Image (tube, rainbow, N blue to C red):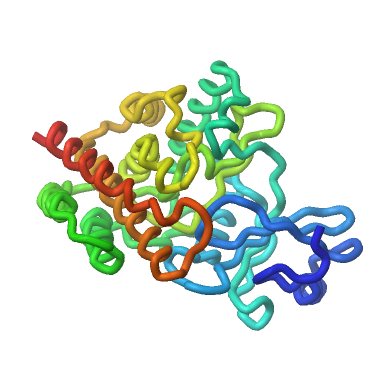
Amino acid sequence: MTTARLDGLDLAQLQRFFSDIGVPTEGELRAEPLSGGRSNLTFEVYDDTTRWVLRRPPTAGLTPSAHDVAREFRVCAALQDSAVPVASTVVLCEDEAVLGAPFSVTGFVDGRVIRTVDDLGTLTDGELGSCVDELVRVLAALHTVDHRAVGLEEFGRPDGYLTRQVALWARQWQRVKTRELPDLERLHAQLAEAIPSTSQVAIVHGDYRIDNTILAAGDPGQVAAVVDWEMSTLGDPLADLAQMCVYRNPALDVILGEPAAWTSSRLPSPDELAQKYATVTGRNLDRWGFYLGLADFKLAVIAEGITHRHRAGATGGDGFAQAYQAVEPLVAAGLAALGEREQ
């Protein structure tokens, strides 16, 4: 229990801010850091009766597109009355004078986070099957939300989304690469030539897998909340689906530095997950090889970026230095997806 100050969180200042905006508190605020997404600092904040979750960017090495707490707060606020379970929204503060950076506060969601293969081992096969079906249902529900009706018409630029994604991750590679990889350049070139001429538009999460959800405490077949929305935008729903499927690659273990729940052989294969989604939504998986190749490309660049930042001294802890080892397997998978499915 912390009652004074954590790195990036001044509790006395936060309590004054709560008082100023009319958020009632009972007793002194306390806080604990929460494990989870590496993009933003996340804290459980609580008083004598209530618990909240506060998210803010790291205290150093800010990259606004990856740490946009305002973005994730706004999408959660928009989805409050939808079929997509999200935490209740309390306040977004963009005044950096309060805590030194923008921050968001949401309600605390009780439940289970299945992050590692050991966590997954607490679920029976039947529970896991229900959980997977629910995860697919929730992603499908997100992709059917009318973004205009919930006030997110300005949330992104869906026109040209796929073209921009291919170009964006190619530019990011040039910024973070630690070596030359001709196969990655070849994957980029093939993707640029294979971009579908048309695509669908939906709210996309951008980072969807089991550990970015909170499962209901008493029922792993129910998602209590989808979390970590900072990569969300308006984009192509098949790109969102493909990213979820590509996260099944064992290379994710290397990127995360631990055996991830989502790479377990107990889960359906990427193709089986995609087919479940197609059955639920009725969507055709046209040009599926392109979407898988793009997702592999994106994750490969992210992995290289983790090692790049580690070598620059911007990250600490175990696992970061080895993330680059995931790049070549992901590139190979992307080239295979394009070669096998785009002929």
Q: Nearer the viewer, residue 43 or 150?
A: 43
Residue for point 61% across, 30% down = 222
Q: Give the image quarter of residue 96.
A: bottom right
Picture residue at 59% right of the left edge, 32% below the top? 119
Q: Place residue 338 in its image quadrant.
A: top left
Quarter occupied by residue 160 = bottom left
> Which quadrant: the N terminus?
bottom right
Left or right: 84, with 171 as reference point: right
Instruction: Quarter of the image for the C terminus: give it.
Output: top left
Q: Is residue 55 above or below residue 162?
A: below
Is any part of residue 170 visible from this angle?
yes
x, y percent for residue 47: 85, 59
Q: Is residue 200 visible?
A: no
Q: In front: 295, or 237?
A: 295
Q: In the image, residue 288 lies at what x, y percent?
A: 23, 36
Residue found farthest to the bottom: 97
From the top left corner, tell me how far across and down residue 101 is, in percent: 59, 75
Which residue corresponds to the image point at 55% horizontal and 68% vertical from the top-left?
57
- Horizontal and vertical percent for residue 309? 40, 65
Most distant residue in the top direction:
126
